[in-house]
Amino acid sequence: MVRRNKNGIPHVVVSLAAFLFLGLAMLASSGCSPEPRLSGGEELFQKNTRIAWVRQIGGVEGNDPFCVGENLVLMGQDRNGERRILREEGSYRKPLFTPDGEGVVFSSYTERAFYYVNWDGSALRKLAGGSAVEVWCDPTGSTWVYYMDGELLPDVFSGKPVKRCRLDDPSITELVWEKTLVSTDNFQLSADGTKAAGLFPWPQVGMVDLPSQTLYPMGKGCWTSMSPDNRYLMWYFDGSHKKLVMRSFDRSIRSKVRINTMPEAQRHEVYHPRWSNHPRFFAMTGPYRQMGKYNAITGGGEGINLYVGKFDPDYRRVECWYQVTDNPHADFYPDLWMETISVANDVIIAQESSISPRSVPPVEWPENREGLVYVWRDGKSINGIEASGIGYHRCNAVRKGKARYGRSHEMEVSQGYFSTDGSDAMLADAVQKSRAFTVAVNVRPALDQAVEEGAIFSKGNVALFQSGTKLSLQTGYEFRIQLGQIEPGKDHFLAITCNAEGGIQYYLQSKPVEVPDAAVDYNAFFKGFGSQPLTFGALASGQADWSGCIDGIAWYDRVLAPAEIAEMYAAFRAEKAASFRDEPPRLVIDAKLVEISPTPSPEGIAPYRSALVEYLYEIEQVLEGRSAEKRIIVQHWVILDAVVYPLDREAGTTYRLVLESVDDHPELEGERISSELIEPVDVYLDVDWE
């Protein structure tokens, strides 16, 4: 297939070798060293390079990083220096280059509309209502502006649907995606336009295959971006806002890249990272040094400047930095455009790779979706059900109390539980109408699960309890059916079917287990079924606390046949085996506390509700395990469910620590992390915290 630009000139598809020879020639003289080097922007702009951004003026507060106010100006810089693209102050947000670099599309937050302007500031025109999120040129040479139509949720800047309109004729529109909410700041396309990386919505990181309208989960975090080629490689921020998590569509790449390595930003957070049209270069803003009403990002302050980073060939580190701006005002939302190959050749890069971009991630469990009304596979999955009229019905499970995620992203409940918070109305309505259900759940009771009765799950007047090693099912608020026994510390895949005519059937590891006959008043039972939210690890009141791990939850509004239950169990067991993690090695030490990072407030981490803080320790004695480092960083939980659990610790004091490497805890990737530490030492998680 031959691509042509808007002038009808054919694009040439080049190999990786040609790309490296030609595309990187412009910076061959940069002399990048093994340690990241900071250069001035003048070196970056020796070739035809352009960058557009929004600057907050009228003081040095820098407290509008999401550009919702009107004391803003639209800025640009190229080889001729820095200038205002438009002279007027006003509402400007998220400038986006057209693929040829000759124009900029930007949004007005206060007007809820988006505009086009030429790079030289001429030909300003309004395109449509909504918020622009991406600009892309199709194989015919037509340029499309992707935009969010409809109202935005102001706290997370999300909305739906995503549409697109022709830049040359905005009256021509097409629907792109409407199944989920999408965050406006983080939607970006692959070069061929078939994949979109984004937040669907925050904190669910995903990649959409647009032709099939399928959403694939990629992790939890924020501020996603897509590599501007066809490798389908994306990133998202980890919880510290200091590292990017790299992930490819086929899951063959997973790495972390620290992006606050220039001298001015060490210890501090950075923001607004966005891939340029060159796969090795990206732009971002920072450093964010002072705390604001909510966090360091909203704190703003002086010296929030633009930086351009260059990845190493393996995308594991930033090998060079270029500081673009240096002024007392705050700069936000950069977009970088680079003419990587001569205009005469007019090349679009379609980089070859050892990655298999066409391989498709597996279908989410359970594959059998007939009658499925609630699903929660684990914390990293989409956990959604396609529903006509609304797209995806998101099956929420919100952490309460001290509940957390385990190393395989399962629910880990002790002194806390998970709740749907009333978002399970579809489940209640469907079951009350069908007067039948099947619920499947995988549970692993804690070794120290109390003898006192605990609720594994509850929904209205149905609940599954464990007392010692015995299971019982509550059917109605008074009646109990004894189901059998389970062992602590082991996985048990349980399934229960119920209908008004056929009674109750119980399955353990997909095998039917005989249960006592029950004289259940099914009319009363189904009538009271949907009166309270679905909870896991306790009753909806928070009472009957249960300790253990839960995942693999599927609830149907019909009775599944034994063969269907066996098939679901086999698929789950295979997935579980494929993702099985051995117990990680532990490090038990006596260590002196050297440096403390501040504990944030619940308001300061919003919209997050949990956070860890990093402390620096000096090892005095190793009691178990081994460490090659004399100093280590330890992450401690300090906020859970918007409640602060302060650490009563003082620098200079020695503490006993039980630790595991954070590399063995992938569930932490999306968690908010407060840190002012910069020492390049190993990082551990405090696992002895209660």
Image: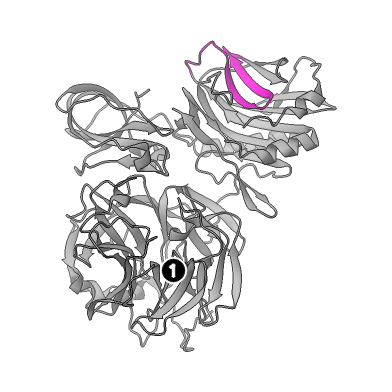
Which residue does the image show at 79% across and 37% down from the upper left?
433
Which span of residues is magenta-colored? 447-470
Image position, residue 65 (x, y; %): 34, 57
State whether residue 491 appears in this view: no
Image position, residue 657 (x, y; %): 27, 24
State whether residue 417 appears in this view: yes
Quadrant of the image occupied by residue 352: bottom left
Which residue does the image show at 17% across and 62% down from the upper left?
38
Q: Tag 1: residue type?
A: Ser
Image position, residue 116 (x, y; %): 44, 77
Which residue does the image show at 53% across and 44% down from the upper left?
381
Q: Is residue 114 magenta?
A: no
Figure check: 61 above or below 96: above
Which is more toward the observer, 365 or 583? 365
Which is more toward the observer, 629 or 472? 472
Q: Is residue 458 magenta?
A: yes
Figure check: 500 above or below 426: above
Q: Is residue 174 left or right of residue 612?
A: right
Which residue does the image show at 56% across and 59% down from the upper left?
160
Helix, strand or loop at mark 1 = strand
Residue receiving disc 1: 107
